[in-house]
Image: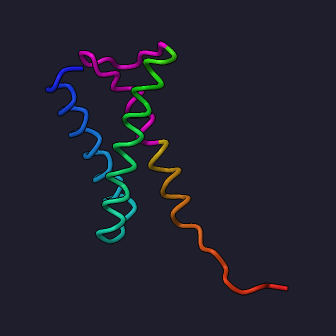
Amino acid sequence: MTLPTLLLAVFIALLYGALYHLFRGGGFWRLLLYLGLSLLGFGLGHWVGIWRGWTLLPLGSLNLGMCSAGSVIILILGDWLSRIEVGRESKV
């Protein structure tokens, strides 16, 4: 992967994280969480696409479809897991 492709991938992943933050809301730390999750999911989606040989919406050497799917899946999963509240007292 070339440097311009890598920069485009980082830009698109950060854009997905920012749009998800705009959609879901939250403070500054949520924004950082969403940006990190989006970068992680984008990379995992690209890796899975290469590993399995799946190509969906190729953009040069970037597998944009798999990257986008990975980013969205990790964003939704991470958001769901981050909103789980732990009860500190017994309900018995």
Residue pictured at 44% horizontal, 49% vertical: 75
Query: Image quarter for residue 10?
Result: top left
- Judge from the rendering whether residue 80 lies leftward or rightward of residue 60; answer left or right: right
The furthest residue to the top:
53
- Judge from the rendering whether residue 22 lies leftward or rightward of residue 8; answer left or right: right
- Judge from the rendering whether residue 59 lies leftward or rightward of residue 66; answer left or right: left
- Judge from the rendering whether residue 44 lies leftward or rightward of residue 19; answer left or right: right
Task: Give the magenta part as a residue range.
Answer: 53-72
Pick the residue in front: 44 or 58. 44
Residue 45 in the magenta stretch? The answer is no
Relative height, residue 45 to residue 35 (above, below): above
- The x and y percentages for residue 28 are 29, 69
Pick the residue in front: 3 or 91. 3
Residue pictured at 37% horizontal, 59% vertical: 33
- The x and y percentages for residue 26 are 36, 69
The furthest residue to the right:
92
Relative height, residue 29 to residue 92 (above, below): above
- The x and y percentages for residue 1 are 24, 20
Residue pictured at 29% horizontal, 41% vertical: 13
Residue pictured at 45% horizontal, 21% vertical: 49
- The x and y percentages for residue 87 are 67, 79
Query: Image quarter for residue 88?
Result: bottom right
Q: Which quadrant is home to the C terminus?
A: bottom right
Relative height, residue 83 to residue 43 (above, below): below
